[in-house]
Image (spheres, grey):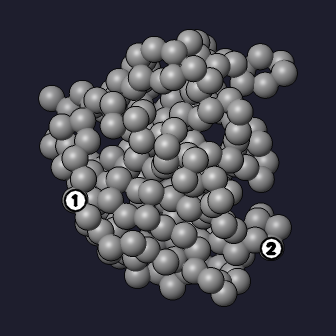
Amino acid sequence: MRFPSQLIATSLVAVLVVACSDAAPNPTGPRALQAGTYRSQAFQPQVTYTLPDGWWLPADTPDYLGLQPVSSELIGIHLFRDPLPASQDLSCPIEPEPGVGGAALALVNWARSLPGFVSSNPKPVSLGGLQGIQIDLAIAAGWTPSCPFANGLPTVPLFVGRSGDSFRWVVAGSERLRLLLFDLPAGGTLIVDIDAYDGSLMDTLLAMATPIVAGLEFATD
């Protein structure tokens, strides 16, 4: 779930940043884009994505792009550019964890080492001309620490953006994630997160999201 430093946008507090006029919500809720192929306007590297009916674009910024079905705020596809590992201090500050690198393998090894997570074994993944690593994450059974803003839900801070007005991503409750992590040819890191805040929806989300993710193309030249 996403926690921008100035505007919270999560399943706990459903406020969404909109950075593309074509995807602006109407007064009664998000407005679905027409089924078709689109390109990011701000996110880098520029990504081309194809959406079916019923999806919209809640955010398109240089370091975060979100894709969600209009029918649910609890599931979605999230792209991060150069995220940093989040501080594990119990106060959950919007700060990076010291001493951890930002490369794909470093992030995978760090996330798998956190006692609050259970993780699948890493496996290689190819996407849009990129080669990377895939893992699944969820909060470990019996984990109880909770960020001050999470209303007592067990939480594990995962990512923060590199700028103070960017984002933070905190895993909470039954949330389940499939992360695809890539080192970009020109430098930097790209992460694709297939994320179900309600973990019971993950199988449904994977059926919906897998074709969208498989069709992602990145301008990495």
Side of 76 relative to 215 (left or right): right
Residue where numbered disc 2 is placed: 152
Q: Residue 88 in the image: x percent, y percent?
A: 55, 76
Q: Residue 36 sits in which quadrant?
A: top left
Looking at marks 2 and 1 on the same chain, the residue that comes earlier in the sequence is marked by 1
> Which residue corresponds to the image point at 70% horizontal and 75% vertical from the top-left?
154
Residue 89 appears in the rendering: yes
Q: In the rendered view, tell whether residue 128 sits above or below residue 104.
A: above
Which is in the foreground here, disc 2 or disc 1? 1
> Which residue corresponds to the image point at 84% horizontal and 21% vertical from the top-left?
28
Q: Amino acid at mark 1?
A: Pro
Within 10 Å of disc 1 (Cα), the crowding (few <14, some 14-19, many 20+) is few
Residues at marks 2 and 1, CA–CA distance in whole angstroms: 35 Å
Q: In the rendered view, tell whether residue 15 sits above or below residue 156.
A: above
Q: Quadrant of the C terminus?
A: top left
Q: Amino acid at mark 2?
A: Gly
Within 10 Å of disc 2 (Cα), the crowding (few <14, some 14-19, many 20+) is few
Residue where numbered disc 1 is placed: 124
Label 2 secondary element: loop
Label 1 secondary element: strand
Q: How many marks?
A: 2
> Which residue corresponds to the image point at 20% horizontal and 32% vertical from the top-left?
220
Q: In the rendered view, tell whether residue 27 sits above or below residue 178.
A: above
> Which residue corresponds to the image point at 75% horizontal and 71% vertical from the top-left?
153
Residue 5 appears in the rendering: no
Side of 201 relative to 181 (left or right): right
